[in-house]
Amino acid sequence: MTTPFAHRWARLAADRGPLCLGVAPSQKWLLAWALSPDLTGARAYCRIVLDAAGDRIGAVKVQTPFFERLGPAGLELLREFADAAHDRGMLVLADAKRGDADDTMADLAATFLGPDSVLRADAMSAAAFMGFGTLAPLLSHAHRTGTAVFVLVRTSNHGATEAQTAVLPDGRTVAQQLADAVAAANDGYGDAGPAAAVVGARAPESADLLGRLRDAVAEVPGLGRAGRDPDEVVGACGSLGPGRAMLTVTTGVLRHGPDPAALRRSLSAWQAETAARLSAAKVPA
Ligand SMILES: O=c1ccn([C@@H]2O[C@H](COP(=O)(O)O)[C@@H](O)[C@H]2O)c(=O)[nH]1
């Protein structure tokens, strides 16, 4: 029997804390780390990140475009990175933000999700712009393989507000409708549903959105960004059950690279801080 993603994450979050490390070998970051902005640089970047993460971090969120731009060798590198992350006990969230018609979704799942897929991730992010129903084949595959689909509910980029807070005829915002759809997609699975959510917690309405998710795992990006108050970001996660919050930091850690010792120090500090802030934010049952 395959262990559901939600249970695997809950166990890791209890052991290693709720922190997820963003992995972004973009040309910008490779140059900032004095690496060549090509496959060689990306390979070195991955080695440094894996060394820094060791076996203490529960999950990595990999920005797939920064690997895809490197062609077939970049995809091979992404797969090697996922294997190496698994060897260190981490879960891999492929942040591909994909969405398409439903007849493509089984193939998308076969590309990204699970040990028999091309890229062997434990989860991927997906957009429901073509209708939440188009995600059904992806969710079924995720259920079968113990993986998860992180649906974009409220993203952390500034430009997202107009589309995601638009009000629907039933009075809910687009983001609220998506959060409710994630919760409904997990109906019948208890606390082990394959639908998860991305909720950038800087937005003032994020606490409401997180509260709508019921048992779904929520990835909360944006920690460590200038202008973001970690208390505000983590505080919004107070209503999530144990092992449901996945708190992602990218820039906040990467800016300490490429020195592995500095990266490790930053990761440890974020790990301790997020765990403490999350437990302080918990709403008593
Ligand atoms: O809505 C968003 C906005 C940005 N990202 C990606 O996250 C990292 C930056 O993360 P920070 O923790 O805010 O530094 C960058 O790679 C963006 O592409 C995202 O996933 N969602």
Image (cartoon, rainbow, N blue to C red):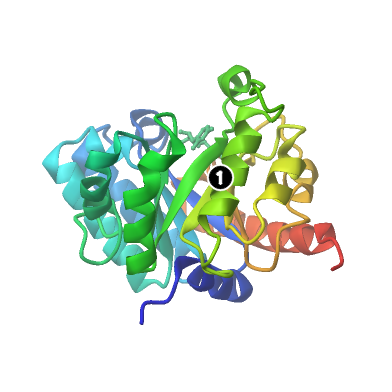
Spot occupied by residue 20 in the image (x, y as percentages of width and height): 53, 55
- Asked which secondary structure carries label 1, the reply is helix
- Is residue 263 in view from this perspective? no
Q: How many marks?
A: 1
Spot occupied by residue 81 in the image (x, y as percentages of width and height): 29, 57
Q: Is residue 169 left or right of residue 63?
A: right
Q: Residue at x 27, y 44 (%)?
A: 105
Q: Residue at x 25, y 67 (%)?
A: 115
Say which of 217 and 132 sits in front: 132
Spot occupied by residue 12 in the image (x, y as percentages of width and height): 54, 72
Q: Which residue is mark 1?
A: 181
> Residue placed farthest to the left in the image?
72
Q: Is residue 229 left or right of residue 251?
A: right
Find residue 42 and report its image quarter. Answer: top left
Spot occupied by residue 265 in the image (x, y as percentages of width and height): 59, 58
Q: Is residue 272 left or right of residue 265?
A: right
Q: Up-down: is 28 above or below 132?
A: above
Tag 1: residue type? Answer: Ala
Circle 1 Cα neighbour tier, 10 Å, few/some/many (<14 / 14–19 / ≥20): some
